[in-house]
Image (tube, rainbow, N blue to C red):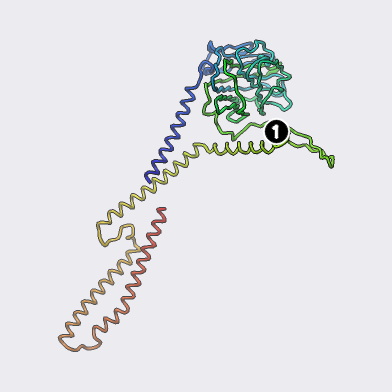
């Protein structure tokens, strides 16, 4: 019992130590040169950052498009030398406008030698790297898209969607509640590119690898002659993946749904069927893709049985074990105190139920002693007088014994079984 308690306590301690060490490791990975300071406490940006066009720092937020028909940008002067992995988290929001618009907010992680023009959402239209685009001008509505460029092709606002490799639906417009967009890249053997929005997965892939080298980090926006104000409230950059990067994919953002018109060749009946892009590609990809989605969700649910619930279970078990240990200590103390008194039964069993049987046993013992005394006295009297009046004492004793002995046996058997039942009840309570 004591060993189990120690193991439970050790497990809880290890969980707490792991959580504490994980938080400390996140802090140690933070890149202060590529992270924005606390804007609420800042009057101006540090020299490591450059605001462009109409962007201003106002009341703890960077307003990239503060007025109608404006553009803005934010770029880090310090380049990031990619060696293996990184995590960047933006906290952004859009206010003052809702509806379809050719404007948008672009978040950049691109090679240092990107073009200097500002033709693509106020950013370069010719780049090598990744652009995360937030806009509401596509056929499927407001989305967050991942667009790759290899530096060999010029992109425009009109054809940018043809370069999208992954996307998710995201309602972002005219909301006072900001969104946290977290991009994580791991370039080691466990390769991973993962995009999360408020800890919900937007997309992820293990097939993407960034070339090593120097990269620029920034954000640009254009509101396309609307009142929409794109704002950045926070930005943190880490030289590796952090704890939140590996939150299980239990919750995911909505993905675009594709409707396909299916015509029955025999009847000519037309039917609209919802299919995923992989299902449309045909072949065995349909069943494999469905299996992948189910396994991914099952994995997330298994991992989502997080440490909080385990801690509560450990605490309940530990409290129960302490209570049981206390009871066992009390029982052992009672048994130990009763060992020195031969012929006595432990206090645990000397309640009112057994006291009646013990009194009967004592009275029967006294009766037998009295019987023996009378028998001896009768023998003496019989030896002196030679005859006795009435029945002989031995006959009386014999008849009396015929009734008393079975009675004594019955009472002792009842006492024994009652004692056994009492012990079984005590054991059941302990278990």
- In what element is the residue under mark 1? helix
Question: Which of the 4 quarters of the picture holds residue 351?
Answer: bottom left
- Whether residue 44 is visible, yes or no, is no
Q: Is residue 405 left or right of residue 271?
A: left
Q: Which residue is mark 1?
A: 278
Say if 365 sits above or below 337 in the image.
below
Q: How many marks?
A: 1
Q: Is residue 162 left or right of residue 404?
A: right
Horizontal and vertical percent position of residue 238: 52, 21
Horizontal and vertical percent position of residue 201: 61, 30
Q: Is residue 180 left or right of residue 363?
A: right
Q: Nearer the viewer, residue 193 or 246?
A: 193
Say if 250 sits above or below 414 in the image.
above
Question: What residue lies at 23% left-to-right and 83% top-to-bottom?
Answer: 393
Horizontal and vertical percent position of residue 193: 59, 26
Q: Nearer the viewer, residue 31 or 379?
A: 31
Question: Which of the 4 quarters of the picture holds residue 267?
Answer: top right
- Give the residue furthest to the left: 384
Horizontal and vertical percent position of residue 56: 60, 13
Say if 196 sits above or below 63 in the image.
below
Question: What residue lies at 52% left-to-right and 21% top-to-bottom?
Answer: 239
Q: Residues within 10 Å of mark 1 (few under 14, many from 20)?
A: some
Question: Which of the 4 quarters of the picture holds residue 85?
Answer: top right
Question: What residue lies at 43% left-to-right and 37% top-to-bottom?
Answer: 12
- Whether residue 251 is visible, yes or no, is yes
């Amino acid at each position: 019992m004591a060993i189990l308690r120690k193991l439970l306590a050790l497990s809880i301690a290890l969980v707490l130590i792991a959580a504490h060490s994980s938080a400390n490791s996140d802090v140690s990975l933070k890149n202060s040169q590529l992270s924005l300071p606390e804007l609420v406490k800042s009057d101006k940006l540090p020299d490591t950052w450059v605001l462009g066009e109409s962007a201003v720092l106002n009341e703890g937020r960077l307003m990239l498009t503060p007025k109608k028909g404006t553009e803005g940008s934010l770029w880090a002067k310090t380049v990031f030398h990619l060696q293996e992995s990184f995590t960047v988290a933006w906290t952004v929001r859009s206010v003052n406008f809702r509806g379809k618009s050719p404007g948008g907010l672009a978040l950049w992680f691109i090679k240092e030698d990107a073009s200097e023009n500002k033709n693509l959402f106020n950013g370069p239209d010719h780049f090598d790297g990744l652009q995360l685009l937030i806009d509401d001008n596509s056929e499927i509505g407001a989305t967050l898209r991942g667009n790759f460029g290899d530096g060999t092709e010029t992109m425009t606002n009109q054809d940018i969607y043809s370069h999208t490799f992954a996307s998710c639906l995201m309602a972002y417009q005219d909301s006072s509640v900001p969104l946290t967009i977290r991009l994580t890249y791991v370039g080691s053997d466990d390769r991973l590119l993962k995009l999360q929005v408020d800890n919900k997965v937007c997309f992820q892939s293990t097939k993407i690898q960034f070339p090593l080298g120097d990269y620029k980090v920034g954000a640009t926006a254009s509101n396309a002659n609307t009142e929409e104000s794109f704002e950045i409230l926070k930005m943190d950059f880490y030289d590796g993946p952090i704890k939140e990067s590996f939150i299980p994919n239990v919750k995911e953002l909505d993905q675009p749904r594709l409707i396909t018109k299916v015509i029955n060749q025999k009847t000519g009946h037309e039917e609209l069927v919802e299919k995923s892009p992989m299902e449309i590609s045909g072949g065995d990809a349909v069943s494999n893709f469905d299996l992948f989605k189910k396994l991914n969700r099952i994995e997330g649910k298994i991992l989502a049985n997080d440490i909080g619930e385990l801690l509560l279970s450990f605490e309940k078990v530990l409290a129960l074990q302490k209570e049981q240990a206390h009871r066992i200590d009390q029982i052992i103390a009672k048994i130990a105190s009763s060992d020195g008194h031969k012929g006595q039964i432990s206090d645990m069993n000397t309640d009112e139920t057994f006291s009646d049987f013990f009194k009967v046993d004592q009275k029967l013992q006294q009766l037998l002693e009295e019987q023996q005394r009378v028998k001896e006295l009768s023998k003496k009297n019989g030896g002196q007088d030679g005859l006795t009046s009435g029945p002989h004492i031995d006959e009386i004793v014999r008849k009396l014994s015929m009734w008393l002995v079975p009675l004594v046996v019955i009472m002792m058997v009842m006492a024994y079984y009652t004692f056994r039942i009492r012990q079984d009840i005590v054991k059941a309570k302990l278990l």
